[in-house]
Image (cartoon, rainbow, N blue to C red):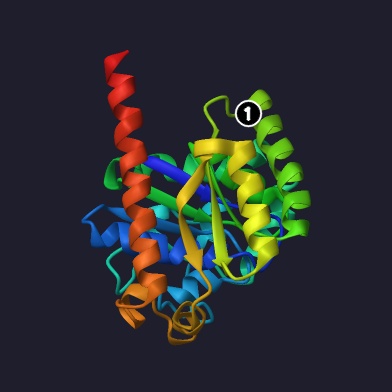
Amino acid sequence: MTRIITIANQKGGVGKTTTTVNLAAALAATKRRVLLVDMDPQGNATMGSGIDKINLRLSICDVLLGQASAGEVLHVSECGYDVLPANADLTAAEVQLMNKIGREMQLTLALDSLHDNYDYILIDCPPSLNMLTVNALVAADGIMIPMQCEYYALEGLSSLLDTIEQIRISINPDIRLEGLLRTMYDPRNNLSSDVSNELVEHFGDRVYRTVIPRNISLAEAPSYGQSILKYNKHSRGSMAYLALAGEVIRRDAKKDHFAGAV
């Protein structure tokens, strides 16, 4: 069964794209079939997957506007996962979607034909709650929220959770909070530890046990158009994302077990 996980947080700089690219690579390393969907006009997940966003003939923009099928737009990354790439054209798509009937369903419809081809579909979102993000939330089975353990991150979290709940009530009753992922974590920082403890106390097992550390290799890898597994597979960042992939797989296996029991 395909799992569609949208990686979202309207706050920028929290590790959304880093997580999308490296989780895709880590899941692919476990022999899962993975598709990365770049829904951010900045196209950073596209570039981080080794794909030149400037010279794209077709992109996710064309898919959302019905000018190309998802299959026509697919690229294969060097890390073994497929990509629906994005670039600045996606900004125009957002404007045109506003006047389109069923505008919030366009990504869902585009991915329908690809479900059987993948075990995981990971969607990278822009750092805002716009129509592109809404499309990504509507298409998702679960939402993964990367966040730094700092005060302002908690403020943005409540707004995002409210949006997810509104979408669950109005459009996608199956959507759920997949989990909260602590990123750029520095255990020497007292505030990081305090916010981390507060998250665990409030959200319990919905906080991933895996913590993504501050790691220079994670920061360097995108400039080479590579995942952390390809750039420095022995780094702490690489080990963390492999651990996250394992945790995601175990959680899904547990859900499938209970679903089968029912």
- Left or right: 212 in relation to 238: right
Mark 1 is on which residue type?
Answer: Arg
- Left or right: 28 in relation to 19: left
As drawn, the residue found furthest toward the left would be 31
- Residue 57 visible (yes or no): no
Question: Looking at the image, is 248 positioned above or below residue 221?
Answer: above
> Percent position (x, y) of residue 61?
57, 60
Is 181 or 136 nearer to us in this picture? Answer: 181
> Percent position (x, y) of residue 152?
78, 58
> Percent position (x, y) of residue 237?
42, 72
Question: Looking at the image, is 255 positioned above or below residue 234?
Answer: above
Q: Count of labels shown? A: 1
Q: Residue at x 76, y 57 (%)?
A: 151
Instruction: Check the picture and name the quadrant holding the N terminus.
Output: top left
Number of residues whose C-alpha sits closer than 10 Å to that of mark 1, classed few (under 14), some (14–19) or many (20 or more): some
Question: Looking at the image, is 139 positioned above or below residue 243?
Answer: above
Is 116 or 195 nearer to us in this picture? Answer: 195
Q: Residue at x 66, y 46 (%)?
A: 198
- Residue 235 visible (yes or no): yes
Give the structural element (helix, strand or loop) at label 1: helix
Question: Looking at the image, is 185 positioned above or below residue 176?
Answer: below
> Percent position (x, y) of residue 165?
68, 31
Q: Which residue is mark 1?
A: 168
Instruction: Check the picture and name the quadrant holding the C terminus.
Output: top left
